[in-house]
Amino acid sequence: MSLDTARPAPSDQGTLADQVTAALRQAIHDGQYPVHSNLPTEAVLTQRHGVSRTVVREAISRLRVDGLVGTRQGSGTVVLGANPNVPFRIDLDMRGSADHAIYVLELRRSVEAEMAALAAQRRSRAEAAAIWRALEAIAQATRQGRDGVKEDIAFHMAIAQASGNPLFPSMLRFLGHLLTDTMHLTRGHEAQYPRKAQKVIAEHTALAQSIQDGDAVAARRAASTHMRNTDTRIRAAMQEHASAAAGDAPRSPARPIPSRRKQETHP
């Protein structure tokens, strides 16, 4: 059975729209629908994939955004030729999977250290001040009993802006909800263990100070240390969450890790 005709099955591969989009994209790439040919009608795709028209429309809309298909008057949805300007995308719905939190962190780890080093070399006085303000906002959120996820993202965005390379803040914006999910996981875990929360504050402070001092070596080291420790915290949070789901008694009476589907995520 071809990917196009297979009905989406419940899995960790994202929503129904994600799965139908992936199936249609693969069918196009495999030549099942050649360039200039028409996709089947909504009614046919709805029946073939066992989903609603709304799901099919969402899938086709995504393909259109990717430049794979277009709509022509009187011809329906037509497969287009290769588009060299197709934007970078992450095909998987990264939410709700334990491994995906690690994938996001590995992606961040590869760029955060260099981003911090460049910020130390290039930051203006105003940009350094913005980093400290963002750090204080995290502390204030913590004092007020909030998770500080939005403030944490703003802190890393301030460093990205200070790097002088517009691709860094662009990449952080692109990661969007993936960063938010990852941060929720570790923030929830840290809330149960005040010493760990204090350690994160110390890591952020060391990073901000090294950038303030213009010390690229120290900034790179501080960012690498923060990412490495974040990896440890994420794995601990996932293990604890898995133990709780299995019925083990939690070692701390504090509130459980917040979750969207199975769990949520932080840096």
Image (spheres, rainbow, N blue to C red):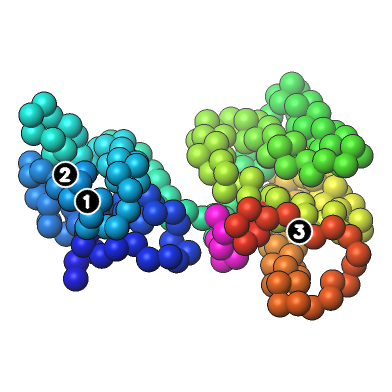
Spatial CA distance of label 3 from label 1 is: 39 Å
Please identify the quarter of the rendering in which residue 74 is found.
top left
Q: Which circle marks residue 233 in the picture? A: none
Judge whether residue 99 is colored magenta.
Answer: yes
Q: Nearer the viewer, mark 3 or mark 1?
A: 1
Percent from the top left, x then y, of residue 179?
Answer: 61, 47
Residue highlighted by disc 3: 257
Q: Are marks 2 and 1 in contact (CB under 8 Å)?
A: yes
Residue type (three-letter) at the residue carrying disc 2: Thr
Residue type (three-letter) at the residue carrying disc 3: Ile
The front one of 242 and 99 is: 242
Q: Which circle marks residue 41 in the picture? A: 2
On the picture, is 80 further left or further right than 142?
left
Percent from the top left, x then y, of residue 69?
Answer: 20, 39
Q: Residue at x 82, y 33 (%)?
A: 137
Q: Residue at x 30, y 40 (%)?
A: 57
Residue highlighted by disc 1: 45
Q: Give the residues in magenta.
A: 95-100
Q: Secondary structure at mark 2?
A: loop
The front one of 132 and 70 is: 70
Residue type (three-letter) at the residue carrying disc 1: Leu
On the picture, is 80 further left or further right than 148?
left
Q: Nearer the viewer, mark 3 or mark 2?
A: 2
Q: Secondary structure at mark 3?
A: loop
Q: Quadrant of the N terminus?
A: bottom left
Spatial CA distance of label 3 from label 2 is: 44 Å
Percent from the top left, x then y, of residue 167?
Answer: 50, 35
